[in-house]
Every structure is written in structure tokens, then in C-alpha cells.
Amino acid sequence: MADRTSLPVGVRISTDIEHRPNRPAAYRARVRWHDPVSKRRLSLSEGKDTEDEAKKWLQALAEAAEAGLSPSVATVKLADYGATNMDLALRGLELKTRDPYLAGWRTRVTPTMGHLAVRTLTNGVIDRAVQGWIADGHSRSTMKNTIAVLVRVMEQAVRDNIIKVNPARVTGWQKLYKQAEDELLDPRALALPDWETLVALADALVAASYGHYQGWGEVVLFAACTAARIGEVAGCRIGDIDTTQWIWTIRRQTTPAPGGLTDKGTKGKRARFVPIVEEIRPLVAQRILTAGPNPDARLFTGPRGGRISTAVLRDATHWDEVVTKLGYEHLRRHDLRHTGLTWFADAGTPVHILRRIAGHGSLNTTQRYLHPDIHKITAAGTALSAHLTAIRAPHPLPHPIAMTR
């Protein structure tokens, strides 16, 4: 393995990737070379979940050979590198500063990016991670401490000659945070206006995807109509769907973790029940039929049967380009959830039921979706005017004969 094999500096290497669909890590990346000392032909291989990951791993080894780094250094994961070098990265800091830095590393950086090799981290990867942390509603000071510890660890990697430039120096996150604060105050502003717009988005994403995979559009429709997170959609099993009452029991979510995607409990740590509206019942029924009788089969998978995530959906459908072309350049995958909750609220769903559908811990979070839209505000004004007019109307006078008596 990489930690026990040294790739000589400057040797010519050959690489190949083998697709093994029946293995947990379906892509085996292998590098081979002739050892200049023993004259033997040696090899090094590792299984990866996707072909892109395999290519990145091979590229890291090739660059390592040129730079004189061993494979163990070239492919070291961020979590492992941070655990080994944290004292160096945080040297000079006071204890009261170290503690929040370490908390940010442990609770945000490692779960989000710890499984990635240090050499594969880019500005784009880190920028998306930062936006995800902001979307989760962390305070400004929490965000500052989390980004600061990541910058320090990556700066140590620069000093160790593992990378040349620190990609963690993300600029403009304060502006993103302010935007996120505004969104949390009015999440309705992020919702798509109607069903036709949602369908148009789904169709455009399918058209932009490789092979025009219809499943991406179905994921988008399902997520919006159930007001669910993409991770929860990815974790949905056939056995979670009750087609008699058309109820989905949300029990888990599929999220990134060290070693790849993994299943864990819902964000609220408890199951919840969500109605499946008529508009999406045909696509759900068809997917259940296609998946077969296995209750543990996933309702939604990628075109090759793999697990999906918000990042997979974004990359496979060219999400950013599509939403920009449609005029929704700020639309994120999580905004499908905002869309569903807004539509439920506008349909008159009581706040205590909406809270259960959303899985919110606080009622205040749910109440943000209850602001009526402009048509309901206008209707309310018309109703009040009619009421006041009725109050102001003169009462009929008593009959003259009745008055004389």
C-alpha cells in the first residue's frame, strides 16, 4: 500500500484504471514502474468510488514522483495530516484561541473534507465547503474559527512542500455569510414560484447531464415536493415508502464522511413523516417497480447505480450553469427544500404540521415560511375593506308608524 511503498524519484510510470462494478470501491487505480535498484517491476493500487477519484489519485502519485515525495505523503488525507501536524499549525496561539479552532476542525472541517487528500483540495472544493457551513446557520465567529484553522493546517502543508499554494484562503466569505443571514430571515425568497418552473428546471438539468439521465430530474422533483434535503432523498429506501397512504418515513440521510459517502440518522436524530403529493406519485411508483422487491434498495441512484449527494447532483447536471441560464443564478440544491416548505405553507398547512414535515427543532424556524405571498396580502386587504364598509353602512330607520306609537 501507499504507506509501505516508495515511488522512486524521476522514474517513468504507467497508470491504468480498472472498473470493477461488483466491488464496494468500483474503480481500481494502479501505477506501475521499474525499480532502478532491484530492477523489478513494482506496482501500487488503491480502490476508489468514482473514476474521477481514481484519476486524481494517479495524478497525485505522478506529481509526487516528480517532486520527490513518497506516496504516503502525496496521498495523505486531510484528517490524518491535521492530526499529525496540528501542534505545528497552531503554534504560537493562546489556549483560549486553540480551543475554538480545534472545535471547528473536529466538527466541521474533518467531517466535510477529512477524507480528501491534501494535494487534491482546491479553491473550489473549499469554497463549496464554506458555503455549506454558512448554509447550516453557524455563527460568524464559528465560521471565522473554522476557516482560520483550515488555513493554518494548509499553510503547514505548503511549508512541508506537499502543496505549492494554500487553497484555503477563501475571500468574500463574509459577504456570503451576510447573504445567508438574509436568507435565513426570509427563506421564502429562495423558493421557486410554481410547479411549471420546477418542471422546467428538472428538464433543463436532465438535458445538461451526460446521457440525459432522467433520474436527476426526478430527484429534483421529489426533493422539492417533499421539502427534503438531498441527503435525505439519497438515503430513501423502497421500504420507507407507504404507497397505500402515500407517506414517506424519513429515517436517514446519505452524507460525505471519511472514506466516502455514508448513511446516518436524520439531522433531527428522529424519523419524520412526509406526504407524497399526487404530482410525483407516478414517478415514485415507477422507481419502486424498477428497483424490485428489495425493501433496502435505494429509491434514487446515479446512472450507474451509485449513491448520490448534493455535490454529485451539482456536477452531473452542470447545476450552476443551468440555473444561471434560467435566471436563478443563486439557486442551490438546498433551495428545493425551501421551495417545498413554502408551497406547503401557502397551501394552508398548519404551523405545527409544517414543523413536523420539516423536522425543525424550533418553531421559530418554521414560522419563517408562513409569511403570506402578495396575492394573499391583497386579498386580506380587500376582505378588511369589505368588513369596514359593512360597519359604516347606515342602519335602516324604524318604520314611521312604529315611531308614532
Image (cartoon, rainbow, N blue to C red):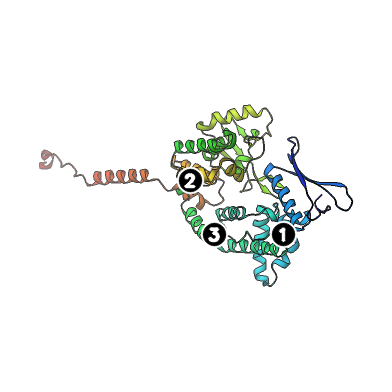
In three-dimensional space, the C-alpha distance between marks 2 and 1, rounded to whole angstroms, equals 36 Å
The percent position of residue 167, horizontal first and vertical second, equals 62, 59
Q: Which residue is mark 3?
A: 173
Q: Residues within 10 Å of mark 3 (few under 14, many from 20)?
A: some
Give the mark, 3 or 1, whose residue is nearer the N terminus. 1
Please give the label number shown on residue 162: 1
- Quarter of the figure with the C terminus: top left
- Give the residue furthest to the right: 38
Front-most of residues 201 and 374: 201
Type of amino acid at the residue the image marks with label 1: Ile
The percent position of residue 73, horizontal first and vertical second, equals 76, 57
Q: Could you tell me if the residues under marks 2 and 3 are in contact, i.e. CB atoms within 8 Å?
A: no
Q: Which residue is mark 2?
A: 324
**Does 332 sit left or right of 59 as displayed?**
left
Q: Residues within 10 Å of mark 1 (few under 14, many from 20)?
A: some
Determine the secondary structure under disc 2: helix
Front-most of residues 22 and 354: 22
Determine the secondary structure under disc 3: helix
In three-dimensional space, the C-alpha distance between marks 3 and 1, rounded to whole angstroms, equals 26 Å
